[in-house]
Image (spheres, rainbow, N blue to C red):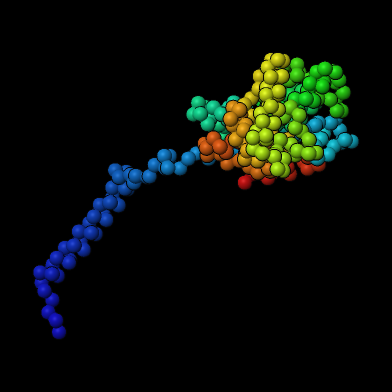
């Protein structure tokens, strides 16, 4: 039978009770509020992530008789705005989005972007007044050549008409709708698909075609004093990486696709050129359509 060394036993016992006393003191300090555990500051290591849904409208119609994938009855459009308002969404403009990226502004807790493709006259006559009534803003993307046609030959039949350039200037001045590039004459699926690159087309030729199209849109807007947002909506959602690079070189900072997804923004400027949007068809009620956003 081994004998216990009295000195070793004493040291072990002393070490045990020192630990117990330390634990007891820690508990007492926490209870009286003297000691507060320090939490790691994650603000520097984890970037702020903003969830940004975007809805895409096209034509509006007075009732359901002409409703379809790209034509929404007016009552459903107003129902959408009412739903977004009740759920606490706040619309943001392209300028507000860019200000946030540049560190010069903030984004609301529940942001939304409301876009209108093709520049239909119903956007001006029906959508803009309702946006103003509900406290929202939006972005309209006209087809330059089509707007020029309605400028040269005025026609205000709401069933099919598009905004003229002077009407686009008024919309931009009113501050409810920003105006953005949707091509001058590339809104077509025959030959070239939208503003995408043709099969076998050289990079030099493609960049030249796209640059010339944008220059014509830009120059016409300037002639009619239409202030443009530095953004583009890709016709039919067709584009490639060379599209993005060309538009970036031309000074466009935001691109709207037709990919139906929520955008999770981290502050990386490159992510702004491929923003997803949800097309709003006729049929589903506002709750059913927007419930996909509530992740």
Please tell me which residue lies in front, 284 or 28.
284
Instruction: Report the quarter where the N terminus lies.
Output: bottom left
Give above or below for 239 relative to 161.
below
- Place residue 208 in its image quadrant: top right
Relative side of 36 to 59, left or right: left
Give above or below for 216 relative to 53.
above
Across and down, in percent, residue 285 comes to: 77, 41
Name the residue located 81 percent from the left edge and 31 percent from the top edge: 60
Q: Can residue 185 be seen in this view?
A: yes
Across and down, in percent, residue 198 comes to: 72, 40
Residue extending farthest right? 65
Please tell me which residue lies in front, 198 or 25.
198
Name the residue located 70 percent from the left edge and 27 percent from the top edge: 213
- Number of marks: 0
Give above or below for 285 relative to 61.
below
Name the residue located 83 percent from the left edge and 39 percent from the top edge: 68
Name the residue located 80 percent from the left edge and 18 percent from the top edge: 151
Across and down, in percent, residue 248 comes to: 59, 31
Q: Is residue 135 visible?
A: no
- Place residue 179 in its image quadrant: top right
Across and down, in percent, residue 242 comes to: 63, 38
Please tell me which residue lies in front, 243 or 50.
243
């Amino acid at each position: 039978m081994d004998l216990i060394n009295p000195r070793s036993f004493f040291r072990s016992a002393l070490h045990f009770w020192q630990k117990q006393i330390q634990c007891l003191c820690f508990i007492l300090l926490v209870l009286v509020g003297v000691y507060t555990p320090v939490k790691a500051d994650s603000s520097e290591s984890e970037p702020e992530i903003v969830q940004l849904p975007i809805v895409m409208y096209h034509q509006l119609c007075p009732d359901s008789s002409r409703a379809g994938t790209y034509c929404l009855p007016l009552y459903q459009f107003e129902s959408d705005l009412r739903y977004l308002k009740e759920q606490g969404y706040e619309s943001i403009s392209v300028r507000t989005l860019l200000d946030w990226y540049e560190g010069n502004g903030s984004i609301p807790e529940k942001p939304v972007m409301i876009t209108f493709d093709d520049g239909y006259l119903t956007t001006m006559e029906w959508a803009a007044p309702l946006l103003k009534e509900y406290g929202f803003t939006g972005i309209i993307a006209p087809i330059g050549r089509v707007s020029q046609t309605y400028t040269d030959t005025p026609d205000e039949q709401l069933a099919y008409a598009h905004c003229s350039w002077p009407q686009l200037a008024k919309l931009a001045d009113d501050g409810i709708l920003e105006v953005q590039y949707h091509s001058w004459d590339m809104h077509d699926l025959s030959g070239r698909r939208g503003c995408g690159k043709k099969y076998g087309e050289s990079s030099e030729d493609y960049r030249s075609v796209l640059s010339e199209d944008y220059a014509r849109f830009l120059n016409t807007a300037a002639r009619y004093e239409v202030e443009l947002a530095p953004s583009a909506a890709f016709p039919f959602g067709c584009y490639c990486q060379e599209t993005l690079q060309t538009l970036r070189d031309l000074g466009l900072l935001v691109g709207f696709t037709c990919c139906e997804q929520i955008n999770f923004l981290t502050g990386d400027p490159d992510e702004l050129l491929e923003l997803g949007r949800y097309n709003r068809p006729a049929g589903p009620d506002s709750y059913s359509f927007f419930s996909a956003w509530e992740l």
